[in-house]
Image (spheres, rainbow, N blue to C red):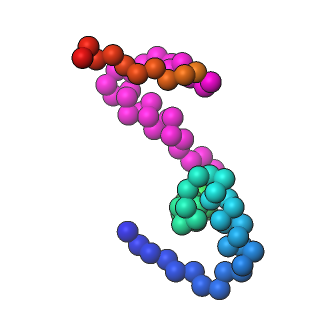
Amino acid sequence: MAQVLVRNIEDDVKAQLKRRATLHGWSMEEEVRQILRDAVVEPGRAPVKLGSLVAARFTRIGLSGELPELQGQTAVAMDFGK
């Protein structure tokens, strides 16, 4: 993977990057990577969402129905008969 070094970033810009990274729950370095990824998306082309990627992957093996929303529900472990 390539590396980019950016010098002479203003202190307030660095502080704002740090705040954004904290809000997203990742490092400042990952925040910058995300910003750069978003910046190079071709105009008129929407970025692919994670759910769409997952659905596309499972379509090939038979997933055809809608998945239920699980927001606010408690996760229950699967019983594998052990």
| Quadrant in which the N terminus is drawn | bottom left
Closer to the camera in the image, 77 or 53: 77
Q: Position of residue 79 (x, y in %)?
A: 33, 16
Question: What residue is rendered at 55% in x and 56% in y?
Answer: 26
Q: Verify whether residue 57 appears in magenta.
A: yes
Closer to the camera in the image, 22 or 82: 82
Is residue 59 found left or right of 20 in the rendered image? Answer: left
Q: Looking at the image, which residue sits at the far left?
A: 82
Asked if residue 20 is positioned above or below residue 3 in the image, the reply reads: above
Closer to the camera in the image, 81 or 65: 81
| Quadrant in which the C terminus is drawn | top left
Question: What residue is rendered at 57% in x and 80% in y?
Answer: 6
Q: Position of residue 58 (x, y in %)?
A: 37, 28
* Secondary structure mainly formed by the magenta segment: loop
Asked if residue 4 is positioned above or below residue 52 in the image, the reply reads: below
Question: What residue is rendered at 53% in x and 44% in y?
Answer: 48
Q: Verify whether residue 58 appears in magenta.
A: yes
Q: For the magenta stretch, what is the residue range?
A: 43-72
Q: Is residue 63 among the parts visible in the rendering? A: yes
Q: Looking at the image, which residue sits at the far top?
A: 81
Is residue 13 found left or right of 62 in the rendered image? Answer: right
Closer to the camera in the image, 41 or 80: 80
